Every structure is written in structure tokens, then in C-alpha cells.
């Protein structure tokens, strides 16, 4: 097995590292304090080509493979999970889903605008009463002349207040269960599409999160993404890409937690010497290093499987489960290394801890990842509704 990076991958990583240090890191603390979704910064991220990183060049993307995309996301995640969330949603949940299931017309209509950042997209799967059991869509799509009328509500939708395009999942025929779900490419510029900001989140204050009311929203026939009835498969395929991106971002949080802890432990003195010289502090640092490396290797394996066209749902879940739990653990431990100083936002570890907590929840909780992995190991599917 060869773990070395190609010259191109090294260059892309170095560029992403430099961009993160120059543009993302300096803005992150204030954006978090102000609860500000920084559209200027999103535009700069788009200019770097990160919003369409895995979209082929012919559709306006950067044409990166998954492994290289993972390197970019790790760097951005190291700087700011809020901006990493923007990349994960736009690139993995929205662009890659249109790329995989879209008609040629849909790809031409949306991808270039999404990649350039001219258009933001959101992914509307979760509802007030539908989370882990995503097949149980309560939002209804009713057939009318020339298209569909959609009624219902979506919850916790990242970028939902700023998106011009929303992927909305809805039930077309309740008798068919998950085989009645469809995904619609919804133009948000209509009266019945009513997003509102979800306030008072624990973290990701620099990222936009919406609750969305859908009142008779119209989607024409040619706005169905994939087939009517295969929306659940569209959603699960999107999450295979999204979970990879979340996992890569978590590696960045692990790494930053480690780097910040090492730096602080060498500077901070107690008992007349740097705290880095205490074995109990080194134990925390060593464990962070182990988890960072393990998380990264799992992400790289998932990326390699994707790039070589092999099945990867289980391995992507393993990477997402491990990397998100590792990132929460590392951020928490980094606060421990910083002592009281880690409890205020002068040190980035405080923000990492609040921001990364959501990664064991969104795009499938850790419990759901375990059920996906358990299903693969046992052949028994615990994810089917009772
Ligand atoms: C900041 C943020 C951004 C988000 N962005 C998006 C987005 O852009 N688009 C989108 O569609 N969604 C988004 N989500 C929603 C997210 O994906 C859901 O919160 C997540 O899937 C969990 O659903 P739930 O919150 O309804 O929890 P529930 O499904 O109610 O789960 C509650 C608890 O029960 C456990 N549980 C549920 N079922 C089982 C089971 N069968 N076995 C064992 N344990 C189980 C869960 O693991 C969890 O611990 C976002 C959420 C947040 C917080």
C-alpha cells in the first residue's frame, strides 16, 4: 500500500492550507461570536474551486478525485467547521447528487452556478418528526398539471436561508413507504418556501441553519431528481458522499486540537516546567495523535474506494463514525490540556469543541452509522421500520 501523495495532491493540500490560514482562520472567531454567516468568505471559497471540488471541469467544477477533495476538506475543517459545512453541503450533498442522478439538462442548469458559488444549494431531508428514520417522509408531493405541489416542513437544513436551490425530499404515495419518496429540485424563490433561522445553536454559529415551511411549493415535472419513487436511494447516495466530507473535516479538527495542545503545553509552565513535560499531559497528546492518524487513514481508505469505483457505504460509515467521535474526543481533551484557558474563545479549541459536537449527529448519528456497519457484518437490517 502506498500512502504517499502525488505532486498534484501535495500542491492542492498546500494551497488549501495557505488559503485556510490566510482567509478562514482570521475570520472564524469573530463570525462565531457574531453568529455571522460570512457570504464574502463563501465567495472566496468558491473562487478557490472548493464548492464544486469533485464536479468534472466540463460542468464548471475543479475535477478533483475524492482523495484530493478529502485533503482540502481536512484543511478547511482544521480552520472552521462552519465553512467546512458549507463545502460539505454544497459539494457533497447537492452537487454530487445532481451529478449522479441529474439529467443532462439539470446538470447544465445548476452545476456551473453551484460550483461558482453564484447559487447556493441545500439538502432538505430532515423534518420535525423525521430524523434517523429518513424514509418516513411526512412532507407530501401531490401531482398536479405540469408538476407537483409540495406541502410540509423541513428541519435543521444547513444553508436553507440562503439557498436558491433546495433538494426537497417528499412522499408521493404513502402506501408505497420509502418507495414513494421523490427528490425535487425546488426553486426557493417562491412564496410558499418559507425558511427561518434556527437560533441558539450550541455551535456552528458561522453556519446557516434553517427550519423551512413548504406551503404549496411548486416543482415542475422536469424538476424531479432521479425517478419518482427512488428518492430514498437518492438521499442515501448523497449521504455516502456527505459523510465522507464530514469525516475529512473531523480529521482537520483532530489535527488542530493536537497542534494547539502541543503548542500550548510547551509554552505553559507549572511546577517550574512546561506542562508538556508531564507524562499525563503527554498521554493526552499521544492519544490525540493516534486518533488523528486512525481517522485520517479511514478517510483515505473510503476515498480510495470511491475513486476506484468500489462499494464503500460501510467503509464511509466507519470513517464518519470514527472520525466524528475522535474529533469530539480530541477537542474535549484539547480543552483539558489548556486548563481554564481552554474554556474561553481566545483559544480555538473552545470553538472546535462546540462546533464539532454536531458531527456525531448530522448526516446520520453515530448510532445509525453503527447500524449500517452492523448490517454489513451480520446481514440483518435493523434500519427497517417496525
Ligand atoms: C446543525 C445541524 C445541521 C443539519 N443539517 C442538515 C441538513 O442540511 N439537511 C438535513 O436534511 N438534515 C440536517 N440536519 C439534521 C440531522 O441530520 C439530524 O439531526 C440527524 O439525522 C438526527 O435526526 P434527529 O435529530 O431527528 O434525531 P432522532 O432521529 O430523533 O434521534 C435521537 C436519538 O435516537 C437515536 N436513534 C434513533 N433511531 C435509532 C435506532 N434505530 N437505533 C438506535 N438509536 C436510534 C439517535 O441515534 C439519537 O441518539 C442537521 C442537524 C443539525 C443539528
Image: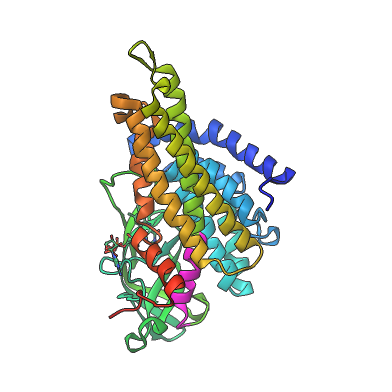
Q: Position of residue 162 (x, y in %)?
A: 42, 53
Quadrant location of residue 106?
bottom right
Please give the name of the residue rendered at 72% of the width and 46% of the height, measured from the top-left corner. Answer: 6
| Ligand 1 location (quadrant) | bottom left
Q: How is the image coloured?
A: rainbow
User: Is 232 within the magenta?
Assistant: yes
52 versus 384 height, above or below: above
Q: Residue furthest right?
A: 7
Residue drawn at point x = 36 percent, y = 26 percent? 346
Q: Nearer the viewer, residue 40 or 3?
A: 3
Locate the C terminus and report the quarter of the image it occupies. bottom left
Question: Horizontal placement of 127 versus 107: left or right?
Answer: left
Q: Taking the image as drawn, is residue 43 in sight?
A: no
Tell which of 370 and 152 is nearer to you: 370
Front residue of this view, candidates 234 and 161: 234
Q: Is residue 269 magenta?
A: no
Residue 73 spot, x, y in % from top left: 54, 47
Which residue is most to the top? 272
Point out residue 31 in the picture as x, y percentages from the top left corner: 39, 36
- Is the magenta region chiefly helix, strand or loop? helix
Magenta stretch bounds: 228-241
Amino acid at each position: 500500500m502506498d500512502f504517499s501523495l502525488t505532486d498534484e495532491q501535495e500542491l492542492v493540500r498546500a494551497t488549501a492550507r495557505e488559503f485556510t490560514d490566510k482567509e478562514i482562520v482570521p475570520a472564524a472567531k469573530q463570525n462565531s461570536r457574531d453568529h455571522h454567516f460570512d457570504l464574502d468568505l463563501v465567495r472566496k471559497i468558491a473562487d478557490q474551486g472548493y464548492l464544486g471540488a469533485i464536479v468534472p471541469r466540463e460542468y464548471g467544477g475543479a475535477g478533483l478525485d475524492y482523495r484530493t477533495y478529502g485533503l482540502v476538506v481536512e484543511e478547511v475543517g482544521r480552520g472552521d467547521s462552519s465553512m467546512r459545512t458549507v463545502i460539505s453541503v454544497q459539494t457533497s450533498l447537492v452537487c454530487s447528487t445532481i451529478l449522479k442522478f441529474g439529467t443532462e439538462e439539470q446538470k447544465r442548469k445548476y452545476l456551473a452556478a453551484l460550483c461558482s458559488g453564484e447559487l447556493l444549494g441545500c439538502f432538505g431531508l430532515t423534518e420535525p418528526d423525521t430524523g434517523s428514520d429518513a424514509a418516513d417522509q411526512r412532507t407530501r408531493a401531490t401531482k398536479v398539471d405540469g408538476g407537483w405541489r409540495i406541502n410540509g416542513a423541513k428541519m435543521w437544513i444547513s444553508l436553507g436561508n440562503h439557498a436558491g436551490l433546495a433538494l426537497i425530499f417528499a412522499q408521493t404515495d404513502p402506501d408505497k413507504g420509502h418507495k414513494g419518496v421523490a427528490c425535487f429540485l425546488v426553486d426557493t424563490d417562491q412564496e410558499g418556501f418559507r425558511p427561518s433561522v434556527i437560533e441558539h445553536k450550541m455551535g456552528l454559529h458561522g453556519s446557516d441553519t434553517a427550519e423551512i415551511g413548504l406551503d404549496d411549493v411548486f416543482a415542475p415535472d422536469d424538476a424531479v431528481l432521479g425517478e419518482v419513487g427512488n428518492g430514498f436511494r437518492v438521499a442515501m447516495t448523497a449521504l455516502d458522499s456527505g459523510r465522507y466530507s464530514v469525516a475529512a473535516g473531523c480529521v482537520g479538527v483532530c489535527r488542530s486540537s493536537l497542534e494547539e495542545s502541543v503548542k500550548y503545553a510547551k509554552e505553559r509552565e507549572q511546577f517550574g516546567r512546561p506542562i508538556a513535560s508531564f507524562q499525563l499531559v503527554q498521554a493526552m497528546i499521544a492519544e490525540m495523535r493516534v486518533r488523528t492518524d486512525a481517522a485520517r487513514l479511514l478517510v483515505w481508505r473510503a476515498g480510495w474506494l470511491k475513486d476506484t469505483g468500489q462499494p464503500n457505504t460501510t467503509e464511509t460509515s466507519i470513517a464518519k463514525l470514527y472520525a466524528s467521535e475522535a474529533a469530539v474526543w480530541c477537542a474535549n481533551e484539547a480543552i483539558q490540556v489548556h486548563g481554564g484557558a481552554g474554556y474561553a474563545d481566545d483559544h480555538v479549541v473552545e470553538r472546535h469543541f462546540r462546533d464539532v459536537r454536531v458531527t456525531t449527529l448530522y448526516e446520520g448519528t453515530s448510532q445509525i452509522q453503527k447500524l449500517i456497519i452492523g448490517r454489513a457484518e451480520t446481514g440483518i437490517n435493523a434500519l427497517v421500520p417496525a
